[in-house]
Image (cartoon, coloured by chain):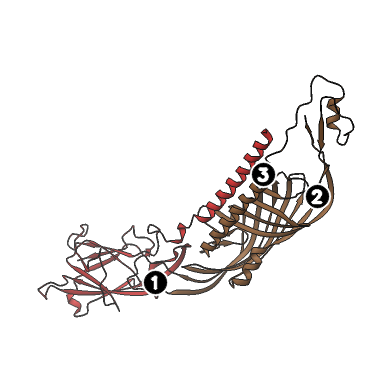
Chain colours: A red, B brown
Amino acid sequence: MFAIKYKNMQMKKIVVFIMLLACAFSSCEKDDICDANTPTTPRLIIEFYDFDNPSVLKNVSNLRVIGQGMTEPLLFGGAPTTSGSKIALPLRTVGTTTTFSLTLNSGNSNPALIDEDIIRFDYSTQELFVSRACGYKSNFTLDPTTPFTHTDPIAANQRWIRFISVEKNSITNENETHLKIFF
Amino acid sequence: MKHTLKSFFSSLLFFSIAITTAQETTTKGEIPKAPKANTAAPAVSIQKPLSTAIINDTVKKATVVPPKTDRYGVRVGLDLYKITRGLYDRDYKGLELVGDYRLTKKYFLAAELGNENKTTDDDRVNFTTKGSYLKVGFDYNGYENWLDMENIISIGLRYGFSTFNQQLNSYRIYNANPYFQETPTIASGRKFEGLSASWIEVVAGIKAKVFDNVFMGFSLRLNRLVTNKEPDNFSNLYIPGFNRTYDGNFGVGFNYTVTYFVPIFKKKVAPKVVIKK
């Protein structure tokens, strides 16, 4: 009788083991979706500072950002304009240049206050493998000689941005400020 | 594909349970202890295999099971799943030869040798893996057969080694902020050669003799990577023999084999004398 019981136990062990294997096979599929916390293609982080007091952050007023060739403005938390002191601009992963138009006091009733500046960024890209679910990401390195070109569509003397400083040439994550804009 | 595999596995699981219960021995007799009163002859008579003539006074009736012979030899065959998959999946070509050699009553030396050529089309990457692998280890048969049956329900271990190369056919850049709405699939064709990996595999398998010397079997395998030589700026998302890699270095696999047993020699098993009072 003991021998039979022992054999049954062995059988059960095997069956349980096979079941565990089957479970292991059917689950574990969550790496098919790219986790939002995974660092992928970073954006260009810009902070705004007071030109007269360069160590103090300054809020922009109703800044509207639109990429060249696009009809819709970049959204800041769902809104078409921002009045904060920090923005994140997505760069094009195809090609090595991205141009943005930054309009201060966008939609203001006084047209004299509305000021548009254009900044073109030149960079090189590095494509790095992330994971099966995310594929590759693109890091950027701003051109060491001419990282940006700052122009005004109307007249050169109407620029609202008075100085741009490149803090980080290589854009590999969104935890650091890459560019400081003084106005 | 994922769901068909799942149902395939559940059916295998069902059959494995069915087989284990079908051959359950419930009415196996007990071997009584030799009577202690008569010390001289009776104890000896039990141990002698065919001496039915000498019957102890205290034993009324003795049933003697004919001597059982275990066949030893080499079993060779191939994985049917890999071959049939090559017929309907044009992104896959594979061949796996399997073999084992019976070392002792319960232990088998086992090996698998294979070659795979698989193109994996994931959402973000498309790549082709080509390579060969060898797995060597042992199986332990935990199944006690009736009479001259030779079925096997086993647990085993393998050490697997694979050399392969990967070709990245195309990929996509992940952008969490797709303002410019660029999600092009970029053709690559970049090759990563001289890659290798090794792993430990736990195998749960079953083999049933369908007719003379021909066995059908399947096994489920749980793998864990030991070494993995990864390409630069890519990853071994598929390894021949190991299959798809998951986070945490784990993998799973299975095969569905048909094998032919080549007997080499036989060993007699000491018969069990079942005595009833």
Q: Are marks 1 and 3 in contact (CB under 8 Å)?
A: no
Q: Are marks 3 and 2 on the same chain?
A: yes
The residue that label 1 is drawn on is A93
The residue that label 3 is drawn on is B24
Please tell me whether mark 3 or mark 2 is closer to you in this view.
3
User: Quick one: which residue is furthest to the bottom in this view?
Assistant: A154
Q: Nearer the viewer, residue B100 or B131?
A: B100
Please tell me whether mark 1 or mark 3 is closer to you in this view.
3
Q: What crowding class fits label 3: few (fewer than 14 Cα within 10 Å), some (14-19), or many (20 or more)? A: some
User: Quick one: which residue is furthest to the front in this view?
Assistant: B60
Question: Hey, what amino acid is under mark 1?
Answer: Thr
Percent of width and height locating residue A151: 25, 76
Q: Residue at x 17, y 75 (%)?
A: A158
Percent of width and height locating residue B261: 78, 56
Give the chain of mark 1.
A
Percent of width and height locating residue B78: 70, 62
Question: Hey, what amino acid is under mark 2?
Answer: Tyr
